[in-house]
Image (spheres, helix red, strand yellow):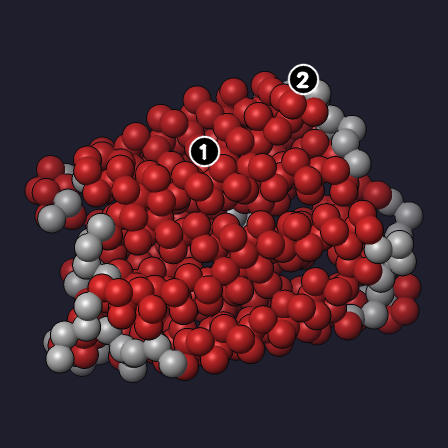
Amino acid sequence: MPINQKDLRKKILIPCLVGQALEFYDFTLCGVFMLILGKNFFPAGNDFAALLGGIFAFSAAFWTRPLGALLFGHIGDKYGRKKALTWSILLMGVPTLVIGILPSYASIGLAAPCILLGCRLIQGLCAGGEYNGAAVFALEHMKTKPGMISGLISASCVMGAVSATISAYLVTNFLNFEQAWRIPFYLGACVAVVGFILRKKAMETMEFIKRKPIKGLPIVEIIKKYPKQYMLAIAAGAFNGVLSYTLFGFLNLYITQYIGVKFATSLFFNIFGMLAFMICCPIFGRISDKITPYRSMLLAAVIAIFSSWIGFVLLQRGTFEEIIIGQIFIGIGVGSFVGPSHIFLQQQFLPEVRYTGVASGFSIGMAITGGTTALIMTYVIKETQLLLAPAMYISGAAVLWILALTFFSAKDQKQANK
């Protein structure tokens, strides 16, 4: 018996959105607490070294993200989208709890950074299977206004990141004890269980059920039959990594270290950038329904270039209003790309290899740039003393993305836009 769209929203879309938000709450906590993690779990005495340690720990999750995408993508293409997504969200909560209870470097020495890195590696493994897999799952169910659905999926991740940032802002401003930062990590472990329960109640997609199963490994099939599409997924992940983790991870460091804003205040400012990102995702997703995902992805590159330059110029001016507006401009640039990206990538692969193709390609790109963007931007500013260096970096990444889309042949464009 066919299920109407209202029932699908209740049984599929809402659990999918809530699950994404919960999982990315856990994943983002290490980003917003980057400075605190560096000071607690790495040797004391050198603030810059502690800062690099925090960035390094945050970046570690990106190393295993491609492996997680291959693992959960294989499960999703062979045994079901639901099974892969259900376990990825539960496993995300375990390392979140461990980080929350982990003793400091002063207490257990080198074991502290080692355990922290191990936890981030596991979180990266789970995120590799979750982000794109949830979009595949939702879009295979929901056939009307797919661009908007793509944007809503992206926005739910931002909602989780915003929740993590708000929790960090609250505990650092209103709880006056040294270990208050651990509370959001305890909450993160609890919400992972809630996400697991929601996912268990969802139903499998008909596209997966009706697919023509392949005999071999999905990744082998992709390399043989989808090489160009796979490279495009890698390029999309790389550009996404530059944009998203400039906003999520680097801007807090930027306005704290170079503009002179207190860490707690930087979290407050960053919320505006994230909210702009979240609001723009479904807006630009809906635009992609009107102008095709391919054209929407080209438009996003142009917007990212202009918004990053305007944003960083405003951030440098350092007034309360200009920092907020600068964050909003950068958030708009990120949302313009991320919103329609799911539906664009979904269209590149057939159902029998879709989960693996989208998730692993995207995660390889994210591993290249998501984990290195904050490190590169910090290093380049230190060496050149150019506070506009991040805008230059984003512009270069946008040009490379345009070249990747241009390389996509006319025939492939037509096929992808169907």
- Residue 343 screen position, x and y as percent: 26, 51
Q: Nearer the viewer, residue 304 or 166?
A: 166
As shown in the figure, which amino acid type bears the numbered disc 2? Answer: Arg
Residue 332: numbered disc: 1
Residue at the disc numbered 2 = 317
Residue at 11% across / 37% down in the picture?
410
Residue at 32% across / 52% down in the picture?
150
Residue at 60% across / 54% down in the picture?
163
Q: Nearer the viewer, residue 109 or 77?
A: 77
Q: Quadrant of residue 82?
A: bottom left
Instruction: From this view, report whether residue 183 is shown above or below residue 47.
Output: below
Q: Quadrant of the N terminus?
A: bottom left
Instruction: From this view, report whether residue 317 is shown above or below residue 414.
Output: above
Instruction: From this view, report whether residue 86 is shown above or below residue 256.
Output: below
Residue 99 visible from this viewpoint: no
Label 2 crowding class (10 Å Cα cut-off): few <14, some 14-19, many 20+? Answer: few
Residue 389: numbered disc: none
Q: Secondary structure at mark 2?
A: helix
- Residue 274 screen position, x and y as percent: 54, 42
The answer for how far apart the CA atoms under marks 2 and 1 are is 19 Å
Label 1 crowding class (10 Å Cα cut-off): few <14, some 14-19, many 20+? Answer: many
Residue at 22% across / 64% down in the picture?
5
